[in-house]
Image: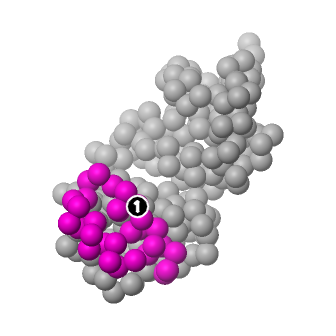
């Protein structure tokens, strides 16, 4: 029987599209073009659904680092489907250091995390304090996804505001976080913009994203434009 890693790679190669590869590469300047095959995301998700049930999938999850962008995405989408929180968390933490681009990072949203927010929270702080760019980005992203609604606390804003980084992809996620916070927790978030608590880049990007958002009213957008 052909090894599962070879089966997966063969299937990805068979479904690759050269024109789509060029499009993907244009969105991910940090990824070596030779590591991108050009397989569409819905196709990779269908593969994750299939291979996630394979009794040998653990061999693929342990086979790190992967050689191709789509293998990383497949890995992320398989993790998403793990229903046991402890197992999902273990696989997430094993995989995070190998993520090398924003798309794989932002696309991995395990379903079981939604039902285990309180258990997840301490790990978000660990990830945010990591030295690895995309682990930090992932921690901020998960804080944004899970803790800006009914589970929100003002201290989370402070946590993201105090992150110090020269990494573009970390600060872009910080900006996205604050733009989303302005849409969902406006009164608590606005002082961070009024007082220019954030670095100049993140401040400007947060306002830009907020002004572009359909979830923020025109009168609030007017206020934000005046704080650029």
Figure label count: 1
Residue lying furthest right in this view? 34
Horizontally, is 88 left or right of 224 in the view?
Answer: right
The residue drawn where x is 54% and y is 66% is 170
Vertically, is 150 above or below 41? below
Highlighted range, magenta: 199-228
> Which secondary structure class fits the magenta region best?
helix
Q: Position of residue 37 (x, y in %)?
A: 72, 32
Inspect the magenta stretch and tell me whether residue 208 lies in it: yes
Residue hosting label 1: 209
Q: Is residue 207 visible?
A: yes
Who's the residue at 31% across and 83% down the image? 194
Q: For residue 51, which quarter of the picture?
A: top right
Q: Nearer the viewer, residue 164 or 191?
A: 191
Residue 113 is one of the magenta-drawn residues: no
Instruction: Classify the position of the N terminus by image quarter.
Output: top right
The front one of 128 and 44 is: 44
What residue is drawn where x is 66% and y is 37%?
23
Q: Position of residue 118 (x, y in %)?
A: 29, 58
Depth order, front residue of 160/219: 219
Residue at 59% x, 38% y is 73
């Amino acid at each position: 029987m052909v090894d599962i890693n070879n089966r997966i790679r063969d299937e990805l190669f068979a479904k690759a599209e050269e024109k789509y590869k060029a499009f993907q590469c244009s969105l991910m300047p940090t990824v070596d073009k030779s590591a991108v095959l050009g397989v569409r995301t819905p196709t990779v998700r269908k593969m994750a659904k299939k291979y996630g049930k394979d009794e040998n999938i653990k061999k693929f999850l342990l086979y790190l680092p992967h050689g191709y962008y789509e293998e990383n995405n497949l890995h992320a989408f398989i993790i998403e489907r793990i229903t046991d929180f402890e197992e999902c968390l273990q696989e997430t933490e094993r995989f995070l250091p190998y993520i090398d681009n924003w798309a794989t990072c932002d696309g991995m949203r395990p379903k079981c995390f939604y039902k285990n927010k309180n258990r997840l929270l301490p790990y978000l702080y660990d990830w945010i304090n990591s030295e690895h760019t995309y682990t930090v980005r992932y921690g901020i992203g998960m804080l944004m996804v899970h803790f800006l609604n009914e589970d929100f606390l003002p201290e989370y804003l402070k946590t993201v505001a105090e992150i110090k980084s020269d990494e573009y992809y970390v600060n872009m996620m910080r900006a996205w976080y604050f733009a989303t916070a302005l849409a969902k927790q406006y009164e608590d978030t606005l002082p961070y913009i009024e007082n220019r608590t954030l670095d100049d880049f993140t401040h400007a990007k947060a306002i830009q994203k907020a002004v572009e958002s359909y979830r923020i009213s025109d009168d609030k957008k007017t206020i934000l434009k005046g704080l650029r």
